[in-house]
Amino acid sequence: MDDWIDYYDSTHTIYASKLHRDLHFQGIARDIVGYIPSPDAVVLDYSCGEALSAGKVADACMTLILAEPAPGVRGRLIARFAPNTKIRVRSLDELRNMQEASVDLVVMNSVAQYMSASEFDAALAVIRRLLKPSGKFVLGDILQPEVGMGRDVLALLRFAARDGFLKDALVGLVATALSDYRQLRTKVGLQRYSEADILARLKKAGFSAVRAPKNIGHNPWRMTFVARPVSGT
Ligand SMILES: C[S@@+](CC[C@H](N)C(=O)[O-])C[C@H]1O[C@@H](n2cnc3c(N)ncnc32)[C@H](O)[C@@H]1O
């Protein structure tokens, strides 16, 4: 296994159990819905993963584009959401050919850490092109340089204790520690950015951004940013 896309395309143990996975995607969908500006919005979820609760997001907007690079995950998304006429599934390459200024809200949650810095900048350019001038880009779950893996473990255990899957989470942590995840985290690593670094990258890509008071999802030690296109850039 060479990269994080392969990892997410494999039968990984990042979700400790079905309950954990379901609660994760329910929480993410709830947070995305909170950012949808109106029921006629076009929403893009960039690297959406399994997006098990995407139906809830689609209920709150006009069109939901689920973009995902991992081919196996994408195949499951196509099968899962075929009956939902509001949902389109796309590869990341296909996003480059979409009409510019056609999207009201782009969400990229828990993805930037898996990209190289240059991949991240390239993704920002694609997103900037797709957003309407009035659009919004929400960038979630950014890891900070000074916050280590211990906080990830603590955040997961707090989430598990609150929602009744603590035993699963403990077993899952051991499985993950012994898995490809641990190897990849050592070999390929995760990209971390300070608040100032993210704001500077967003500015360079043509956005004006602020840090949101609350991160998307369950980990309060990670950061979410809300960015708007700057006209004329
Ligand atoms: C932790 S999951 C996040 C899924 C979803 N956005 C969520 O919040 O649950 C990470 C996602 O990033 C994707 N990914 C991994 N490496 C990537 C890369 N280099 N470029 C774009 N996406 C990548 C994976 O395929 C996976 O869908």
Image (spheres, rainbow, N blue to C red):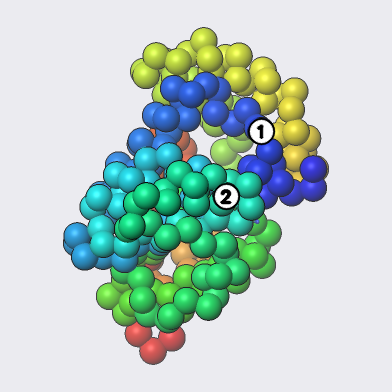
Residue identifier under label 1: 11
Name the image quarter holding the N terminus: top right
Residue in the foreground of this view, choosing between 103 and 78: 78
Percent position of residue 121, x then y:
59, 69
Nearer to us in this view, 170 or 84 = 84
Q: Check disc 1 and report its element: helix, strand or loop.
A: loop
Quarter of the figure with the C terminus: bottom left
Which residue has dot 2 on it? 75
Q: Residues within 10 Å of mark 2 (few under 14, many from 20)?
A: few
Residue 172 % position (x, y): 60, 20
Residue drawn at (75%, 23%) of the image: 178
Residue 58 position (above or below residue 93): above
Q: Is residue 6 left or right of residue 149?
A: right
Rendered location of residue 67, percent (x, y) = 50, 59
Q: As drawn, is 42 to the left or to the right of 4?
A: left
Q: How many marks?
A: 2
Where 172 sits versus 103, above or below? above
Q: Residue at x 51, y 62 (%)?
A: 90
Q: Is residue 105 visible?
A: yes
Question: Mark 2: which amino acid?
Answer: Gly
Question: Dot 2 lies on which element?
Answer: helix
